[in-house]
Structures are given as C-alpha cells and as structure tokens.
Amino acid sequence: MSIFATSTAAFFERSTQSLTALRGQAEDLQNQISTNSKLTKSSDNPLAASQLRALARAEALGTIDAAATNRATVDLNLTDTALNQFANYVSRAQELATQAASSLLPPAQRASIASELGQIHQGLVGLANARDSAGHALFGGDSAGNAYEIDSVTGLAGYIGSGSAGQLSLGDGQTVSRSLTGPEFLSFKDPAGNPTDLMAVIKTLSDALSGGAASTAATASAALGSLANGLDAITTAQTVVGSRLSWIDMSTERQQAMGEARTSQQEEIGTPELGSALARLQQLSTVLEASQASFSKLANLSLFDFLR
C-alpha cells in the first residue's frame, strides 16, 4: 500500500513539475514577444546581458559624441559665415583705401570715406564679438563674455578672450576646435614685418582720413599692404575652418557606421525573431494543453475501475 501511495505522489510531483516547466517556457516566450527582448532578467543569460550593457554604454557615449559633433559643426559654420563677412568688409576697405590713395580726391569725399571706414570698424568689432551656439564668444576662446572691447582712450579694439578655442570630442580620442580665437586671423604683420591688427589698421586709416587732407593719400596707400595681408590671414582661416568641417564629416560617417553596428549587435543578442518565437509559443501551448488533458484523465483513474 505504501508503494502505491509513493508512486502516486511521485507521479503527481513529476507531472506538476513538467506542467510548471512548460508554463514557464510559455511565459518566457510571451514576455520576449511583448517586450521584444530575449532577456527578461540578467540571470537568463549573464554573458548576453553583459554584452548588452556594454553596448548600451557605448550607445550613450556615442550620443554624447554626436551632440558634441553637432555643436562643433554649428559653431564652425557660424565661424565660416563670419569669416566671409570679415572678408567682405576688408574688400570694401581696400576699395575705399584705393580711392583715398589718390591725392586728387576732394576733401569732402575723403571725409566720406573716413566715415564709411569708421562704420566698417564698428561692423568688424561687432563680428569679432559674435556668439556661438551656446551664447558664448565665438572668437573669444573659452571666454563667456566678449572677445574684444574698445579702449575708452584710443578707441581701438583689444582682445580680452582666452588663449585658445575650446576643444570638442568627436569620440575615440578625436577632438576638434570649435572655432578660432580673434588673434588667430585678425592679428598679422604689416609689409614692414611689424605686428598689427586688422581693426586697428582700419580705425587708424579712418581717423587719418577724417580731416580730409590730401596729405593722407600716402597713409591710405600704405594701408593697402596691411589690408592685403589681413585678407590673406582671413583666407587662411577659412581654409582651416573648411578642413575642420571636412574632418567632422568623416567623423560623423564613422559615428553613424558604429551606431548601426551597435544596433545590429543589440538586435542579434537581445531581440527575439518574432516569427520563430510565435511558432515556438504555439507549439508549447499545444503541448501544454495536451499534457494538462492527459494529466487530468490519468489523475481521475482508479484501480477499482479495473477491478469491476
């Protein structure tokens, strides 16, 4: 009698365990389908869970790098636009200086040229204090305020920014300068080899011409060489900015390729194949229903049914 009881208990226990295991597999598949993830908890597959965490961290860092790349692109495009405007101002200043270099120019026209050069000087100062995408000085390095300020005595613009432009990360240890500092393209040497500044050249010429005297023709003629050097400095700066933008384009392509590779790995490791998962769930459901029916039928059987 004890043997029969033990066998019956074992039968019920084994049947219950089998049905519980089948239900567990079905529930796991349902969770995978509903969450679109193979892993409901890390213990399901510790190695895969670790790989997914590493990919998630890399994705987060990639997002940060992409944001920095976007900011660098915006700031360098702002820099390029400003440099074009600087070049336009200098070209106009060259035209005016060429006119003023003629000793035959009437005093009134010479004074008019001085007035326009004064306006160009103001425009240059305004451009030099342009803002980047974060509202900081575009040409002031890491300075949050203006890059240049006007001396109350001389009227000349002086640089008050930091020594270098900020560096932004492009990922994998690659960085790029987001802009240029003002002195990098506004300061240069005149034809005699003396250091000078573009805004100082134009302000000095404007002040000299304001009296309208014909003797200032020589001053205007001498300024042409400095203006040419200033324009060359701006052109060089535009080349530098263009090369940085090209480098960012290549970095962006690399970031996109790496992001696509990470997405592919995440899907391969953690995302179930929906068709296979549904087919397996249907198969388990069928087996589970059949097992439950068989268990119910066997559980209701009694030895007395066969002794009648």
Image (cartoon, grey):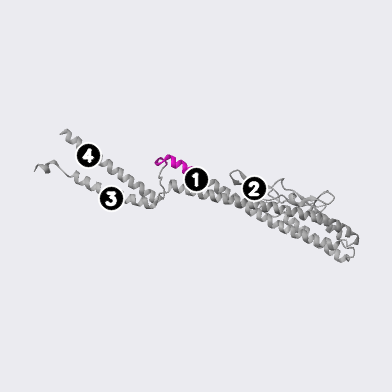
Numbered badge on residue 286: 3
- Secondary-structure class at tag 3: helix
Q: Name the residue under label 2.
A: 176
Which amino acid, by three-letter code, is at mark 3?
A: Thr
Say if the magenta span includes residue 52: yes
- Left or right, 201 with respect to 62, comes to right
Residue position marked by numbered label 1 in the rendering: 56
Q: Which mark is residue 11?
A: 4
Sequence-earlier tag: 3 or 1:
1
- As helix, strand or loop, the secondary structure at mark 2 comes to strand
- Residue 129 lies, in percent from the top left, at 72, 54
Indicate the position of residue 163 as horizontal and vertical percent values.
72, 45
* Residue found at x 63% / y 53%: 73
Which numbered disc flags the more N-terminal residue, 1 or 4? Answer: 4
Q: From the viewer's perspective, tell me whether residue 256 is left or right of residue 10.
A: right
The first of marks 4 and 3 along the sequence is 4
Q: For the residue marked with disc 4, what is the amino acid?
A: Phe
